[in-house]
Image (tube, rainbow, N blue to C red):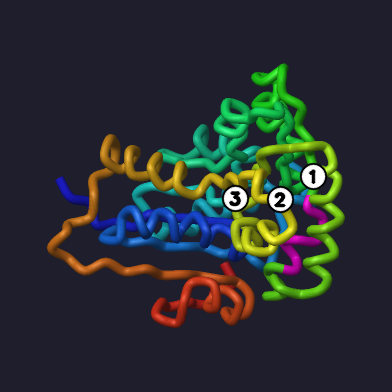
Amino acid sequence: MFNNNSIGLFDSGIGGTSIWKAIHQLMPNENTLFLADSKNAPYGVKSKDEIIALSCKNTEFLLNHNCKIIVVACNTATTNAIKVLRANYDVPFIGIEPAIKPAALHSKTQKIGILATKGTINSELFHNSLQQYKNVTFMEQIGHGLVELIEAGEINSPAMQTLLKTYLEPMIAANIDYLVLGCSHYPYLIPQIKALLPSSIQIIDSGEAVARQTQKMIHDHCGFHDPTQPSNQVFYTNTTPKVLQFFVGAQYAVIQNDF
């Protein structure tokens, strides 16, 4: 049976559009509704209670728009709030976590860099994930200031270059061979990061894995969109639409709403 309700996604800002792109590429016929809570970005510096409250508010907005499944397209919200969301709302949730497992399984140097937000690195879920790989050395780096620059559209700014060099140079010196991006904003920095890293260091983000898991959950629990019907991609933001519009493209509707 078909289900034409939307896939709902939320993030603390525009970063989750990297997850949306992976989902839309895999399932272009599905309706999607993306919520960018840019007014409250970044989540990574907020308390766990604040993150849970914002995640619940975002979830209720998406449920009020009849979303059939919700993708928490934010590492910080996933690691701090997804247990609460699953316990309180009767809808399938897909979370996003740093892709530690594939890096740990394939690392030759047994040294892995992780660039993530404070909220993710300090979370219980993140630390539990690291404990599974006792033989691996993880270099954890909080990406102070990165989300704010991305949200301001300053991806290629000198300030961004300075921050990335500060964060990455110690990892290079420590001989990491994998860099795990632990924030859905950070895939937009991959070109700049690649320019700073030796070619021997591989970069991993979670977009494709999250898209495949979303597809599986829809198949198992929700039902796909009717392929004979057109699909819609809608984006909401509670700040100026300019930056979000830039990241998703002019062909999509971006609606400003003080949700």
Q: Which residue is mark 1?
A: 172
Residue that label 3 marks = 74
Task: Point out the stretch of residues depicted in magenta.
Answer: 143-149
Q: Residue 37 location in percent, x, y?
A: 61, 63
Q: Quadrant where the C terminus lies?
A: bottom right
Evaluate if marks 2 and 3 touch, with contact meaning CB atoms under 8 Å apart.
Answer: no
Relative depth, front residue between 144 and 169: 169
> Is 80 located above or below residue 234 in the figure?
above
**Mark 2 falls on what kind of element?**
loop
Q: Would you name the residue on which mark 2 appears?
A: 198
Whether residue 114 sits left or right of residue 99 in the image: it is right
Residue 253 to residue 168: above or below: below
Residue 151 location (% of width, % of height): 68, 69
Is disc 2 surrounded by few (<14), some (14 to 19) or many (20+) residues within 10 Å?
Answer: few
Tell me how far mark 2 sits from mark 3, CA to CA: 28 Å
Disc 1 versus disc 3: nearer the observer: 1
Mark before the other along the chain sequence, 1 or 3: 3
Residue drawn where x is 50% and y is 35% of the image:
86
Does the magenta run of residues contain 145?
yes
State yes or no: residue 146 in magenta.
Answer: yes
